[in-house]
Amino acid sequence: MTEPTGRRRPTRVALFITCLGDAFYPQVGEATVRLLHRLGIAVDFPLGQTCCAQPAFNAGFHDQARLVAQRNLTLFADYEYVVVPSGSCTAMIRLFYPDLFAEAPQLHQQAESLAARTYELSEFLLNIVGTDDVGAAFAGKVAYHASCHLQRELGVTEAPRRLISRVAGVEACDAEMSEQCCGFGGTFAVKYPEISSAMLEKKIASLQRAGADTLVSCDAGCLMHIAGRLRRQGMDVRVMHVAELLNAGHNAEEPRHAPGN
Amino acid sequence: MSNQEAFLARVRQALQTGGQSHHAEAVSAENGEVVSLVAEGEDLAARLQRELEGVGGSVARVKHVAEAAQYVTRLAKEKGAEVVVRWQSDLLDTLEIDDALQAGGAKVHTASPTSAAEADNRRQEMRDLLARADLGLSGVDAVIAETGTLMLTAQPGQMRGVSLLPPVHVAVARTDQVVATFADALRTVRQAGEDVQQNLTSCISFVTGPSRTGDIELKLTVGVHGPGELHLVLLDEPGA
Amino acid sequence: MHLGTEGFQDHARQALKDEPLQNALHLLTAEFVPRRVAAMQALGDPEALRTQARAVKEQAIAQLDTYLEQFADNLDKLGAHVHWAHDDAEARDIITSIAQQAGAKVIVKGKSMAAEEIHLNPHLEELGYEVLETDLGEYIIQLAEETPSHIIAPAIHKTRQQIAALLHDKLGDPYTEELTDMTQIARRALRQQFLRADVGITGVNFAIADTGSIVLVTNEGNGRLSSTLPRVHVALMGMEKIVPRLDDLPVMLKVLTNSATGQKISSYVTMITGPRRAHDLDGPEELHVVVMDNGRSNILASENREALYCLRCGACLNVCPIYQNIGGHAYGWVYPGPIGAVLTPLFTGLDTAKHLPRASTLCGACREACPVKINIPHMLLNLRRQSVSRGDASAGEGRLFSLWAWVMRHPGLYRLGLKLARLGQTPFARRGWLGKLPPPFHSWTQSRDFKAVAPQSFRDRWQATLQYEQPSRNGAGGGRHE
């Protein structure tokens, strides 16, 4: 992780919204843009972007993954920082792009370069911008769900927790299983629905034991998975992306609360 | 059957094929040095006692040889021991315990060192005795404070079975035999002389508490194969 | 009972409905996970220790040929016999001929995953030997005619009542559910066999190259009995069990027992250096060490070499959210859990085991728990890639990903796709969620709703308004900065 000390505060970043964020959670991207704006950081959104290529990569279809990933090498070539509101997609770019292009020296170099410039949102705020208090306000008992790739591939464990704890009005109530996988795993949830659901049940039970009324995470995939079950069960727990929480109290359009929305 | 050369040739071939992509950290001789959890200047005997009791062993601290002998005799009586098999070692001999045990109703058999030829004759007899023994009495080669572990080598006078077959194992040690860590215990073997293989003896048993299992519903039960009780008598008499 | 790995899906489904198994798994998770975490924390700097332990394995494997040779030379000096087995059949034959030459009738066995790997028991039994597992868990499994479901807690899937009934039925002792009594029943039965046995077979936890010693790590003492009482001791080891030096033992032992059971050390650590010596009054007359390849050299040559660093501690099983839900038998072969999902296809081939690398969310809890930091999730990814390249994926899946890649490379098409999805979902969407999805995604909605595509995607919002918004000039954002 880069140390913020002695480093110029970033003034401009490119946003990689991720396909899930774009199609299902546009409000997350919106919150991310406004949050960065409030911190004085200009945001570019290269319109050619689509997906990080992780679904194909994880399924073992590296040729297809390479085709999609290669476009991102070019699209984001000129940005000093690329900010991604997802630990999973950041891990894809930072860890697996270089592997994916290991055989092609020039592309590999580009992949290494992009990997070094790409940050998940919460680590970007804490480590690069150097802030743990973004002036947000939200009243609720918030449990944090540590998404797997964020905590175990990127090693980002502290940043989201610190940022969440500094939001005015938040009562942090970590579920004892906050580090346990929710069972999403991309296509895993579809290929092994029974196992995936059993994992999700346990996750939700721990959330209930914690007495949380709001669940926050850094990855839309987990949120969609957990919220999908909460909604099916008719449970009244809000599910929010960390960007929404960190922009709460500022957005004209307050985050609408899942389940239901 | 494969022979050694063919087997190793395949290994060599595989190492070369997979060679480039794998990283191997250079390891120095010091790599095995593990940070000791025993603090500098910590009372080793106290630590040993805490650790061994923590895993279900019992530790008796005694001041004199006579006290040690009394403790063992009383324990044998308590257990109703009729057959006792013991190591032969200088420390155990100084306890002069055989008569006391016999007076208490136990028959004592000693695994005394013998010639190689004699050993061949005595094995079956000793094995039969151990199979019936109610209590095994041994010394130690070292005791490890960090984990509460007895180090027992196999050599003339020191049968493996004494600490293994009877339901109760009693070991007598002097406090100056207590070392801080496992690595320290291994060093005592190394330092004993040049030939490491010789010093390692045919078998070193590191024993930490009674025999235990968690194989039924992960619940701890003792005495499944080895002794269900382990008693350490720690004699705090230098040079005893 | 041999399940086979092809049936993974079905076995997993059955396991999820198996109530005693679910209770056992709950217990396992509740007991082992916190125990290991607390034990590793108590070691001061567990990370440094894991780095050290990994370095030992890296070096041992990188120069495996040298260390194996050294190990064999040292055993030779001690008068022990070294045997080399290229595959499972050779290993079985070697052990059989040792038993034959020993004139054996009764064989006692300590716990050995390597022996499970070569299906040694059925083979020896077929030849007329009386073979007894002596680890309590393995003994229970043998009485029940099942296979282990956990590397270090083989009978974890059986309840106390089931075991009590088994002991009563098979041994004829009065029925009891008292743990101490049950244990004593097994002790008595097995002690008789130990005294009768001609050959003792054990596994090996560590094989020390520079002394020729083998190390057994046990809690019950059956490993000690198996290697002490019978006239002949056979130690079967995968060739990767080597550590270079005696001095490596303290660190390896520490990470092994703390990771496996949360113990600072196991009740017994037995370091055997050759057969009994002339003056010894007990110990085996003959020591045979069988070094087994059985597919390991293929792993050594592959990108998944680090699978050979595995110490068989079982820590990755205990933390794995998949294993926690389905247990060990669903994996269908000797090694279950995350490391099993790697080892099984590496040992038995992807033909039958292609499901296993896919049955993972790649959450990485296994890597975090591993005492030698084996990167299991990345090896699962390697195996998935290999599996696809050799044509294991269905034609449908291949087409789907090719279509996906084509759409994702063309933002216009991608946009059109979103539009079509929006249109298609309109009749079904309720307040932004879908209760049912069409195949092949319908399995998602069996238990969960699925998010509907948003009426306006982010890029629509960006183009409509967001791109014209400006960052605040002071950049304070209402917050404090460090």
Image: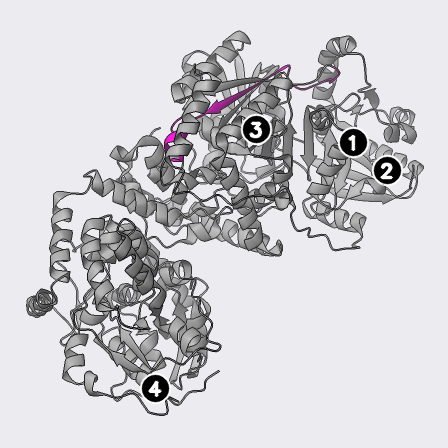
The residue lying furthest to the front in this view is A106
Question: Residue at 68% of width from left, 39% of height from top?
Answer: B208
- What secondary structure is marked by label 4? loop
Residue pointed to by mark 3: C186
Q: Are marks 2 and 3 on the same chain?
A: no
Q: CA distance from mark 1 to mark 4?
A: 71 Å
Q: Are marks 2 and 1 on the same chain?
A: yes
Q: Position of residue A50 (x, y in %)?
A: 18, 66
What mark, if any, has residue A40 been given in the picture?
4
Callout 2: chain: B
Residue pointed to by mark 2: B71
Callout 3: chain: C
Q: CA distance from mark 4 to mark 3?
A: 73 Å
The correct choice, above or below, for A92 with respect to A18 in the image is above
Q: CA distance from mark 3 to mark 1?
A: 41 Å
Residue pointed to by mark 1: B192
Determine whether, in the image, residue C225 is placed left or right of residue B150.
left
Segment colored magenta: C279-300
Label 2 close to label 1 by CB (< 8 Å): no
The correct choice, above or below, for A246 with respect to C423 in the image is below
Q: Quadrant of residue B181?
A: top right
C301 and A257: which one is in front?
C301
